[in-house]
Amino acid sequence: MGFYENEEDAFLPLRDVVFKQLREEILYGKLKPGERLMEIALSERLGVSRTPVREGIRLLEKEGLVVMLPRRGAHVASITAKQLEDVLEARRTLETFAVNACCAKITKTRFEELKEANRKFAETVETHDLRAMADSDTEFHNIIIDTAGNEKVKELLVSLKEQIFRYKYEFMKEMEDPTRLVREHNEIVKAIGDCRSDKAVELIRMHIDSQAIAIYRKLK
Amino acid sequence: MGFYENEEDAFLPLRDVVFKQLREEILYGKLKPGERLMEIALSERLGVSRTPVREGIRLLEKEGLVVMLPRRGAHVASITAKQLEDVLEARRTLETFAVNACCAKITKTRFEELKEANRKFAETVETHDLRAMADSDTEFHNIIIDTAGNEKVKELLVSLKEQIFRYKYEFMKEMEDPTRLVREHNEIVKAIGDCRSDKAVELIRMHIDSQAIAIYRKLK
DNA sequence: TAATAATACTTTGTATACAATATAAAAACT
DNA sequence: AGTTTTTATATTGTATACAAAGTATTATTA
């Protein structure tokens, strides 16, 4: 790697640097589903030996971003329609829980953060910067999840979202009217503000499902 | 490792053999929470080099069974009360989903399997063989989860249960009346058989929560 | 020419060697 | 004696070397 993109990475073991780097490349489409990850090529490109590359791959494997074929190495995970359905259903289940818990625990300042996050999201939608949009959308959802206060649920949701991020990203590229997402977010904010957890739960389900359907359609 | 406990392991990469072996030892308490996993000692004990040991540890790390301290190696994960709560809450959320889906999808033969599984569980309870009890309890729940038909949810539940298995195991040791679990299972079977998914969901919540409370009490 | 066998090459899987850091022990000092 | 400094030891992190299996290429045969 030679130099470090982020200061903080300078203290991480190389396996974690490799993990973060490859995760980034998989999520944002530089490495494409099905593509083979060859250890020597990666170690040369990243400027480290095979050992941290291999350990980084083990982490990606457990994260669900790569699949191993015995004696044939690591491949960027691709996804079947069934797997996509399963992941989205799991995500919906956990995020429904999170919204519900969020309604019960939200504070005034957290609520302001949530509104602010959606303002930012609305801004990035205007810029048409896909990467920024994806990031600020994630930020919005993360505030809800953080407020729910369950670290394990958060961890699982991060992992689940990563597994379909690649496809969501592609889908957003071709989205006709991204401002609809902003409006949906606003409705969710409103329901949370009014302590209408049943309403908020229903909205987040629809929010996720509508994306699910679009991604699903695109996959075929 | 020299010889193989299971035939099937003979074709697995050593990292996976190491992973399975250490997971087993962590789950059933041979390796205790907080205990340090030293690579050289492990590689000598398991009869392999450090390389597969390290890769196996990476897998355990992502599975949540070990935690890494930088430059201080791997330690068997111990759990705080908060983490336990979080895991149990996540489990309850996903298993609730699973029971609901199970009610919608169950077939006659699957229902018979479920009843049979609880008969087996009742038998093992009589033997007082703790290991067998834990295994057949898992078997019962797995039929419900399999019937739900969501592979990702299953995968997450396996991981979540592993993270608290050690404590559940300890708790079962001191359980006054394990036949209560059999009766709870029977009620769940009945509700599923009657297609009363709301009832089944409520029962599984109670089933998990009652264990949660007991484990929680034991942790302190 | 098509199919098969033999060979060379690549790549993964595993083991070992080296480097850097942390822990433990011993020595020096106040 | 207790504290700090120095030294030695042990352990993790990283790199390289070797072995085994897979892939591709060439040669051989029908």
Image (cartoon, coloured by chain):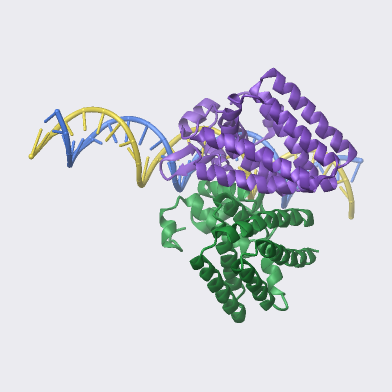
Chain colours: A purple, B green, C blue, D yellow
Quadrant (top left/top right/bottom left/bottom right) for the N terminus of chain A: top right
Q: Nearer the viewer, residue A126 or D28?
A: A126
Q: Residue at x 51, y 41 (%)?
A: A81
Q: Residue at x 62, y 33 (%)?
A: A20
Q: Residue at x 41, y 54 (%)?
A: B11
Q: Position of residue B84 (x, y in %)?
A: 74, 57
Q: Nearer the viewer, residue A79 or B1?
A: A79
Q: Position of residue B70 (x, y in %)?
A: 68, 42
Q: Quadrant of residue B139?
A: bottom right
Q: Position of residue C1 (x, y in %)?
A: 14, 28
Q: Residue at x 57, y 32 (%)?
A: A166
Numbered-mark total:
0
Q: Quadrant of residue A194?
A: top right
Q: Nearer the viewer, residue B52 or B11?
A: B11
Q: Is residue A186 in sight in this rendering?
A: yes
Horizontal side, residue C14 vs residue A130: left or right? left
Q: Is residue B73 in sight in this rendering?
A: no
Q: Position of residue D3 (x, y in %)?
A: 88, 45
Horizontal side, residue D5 vs residue B186: left or right? right
* Farthest-out residue, bottom: B126
Q: Quadrant of residue B170?
A: bottom right
Q: Nearer the viewer, residue B35 or A88?
A: A88
Q: Is residue B119 above or below residue A82?
A: below
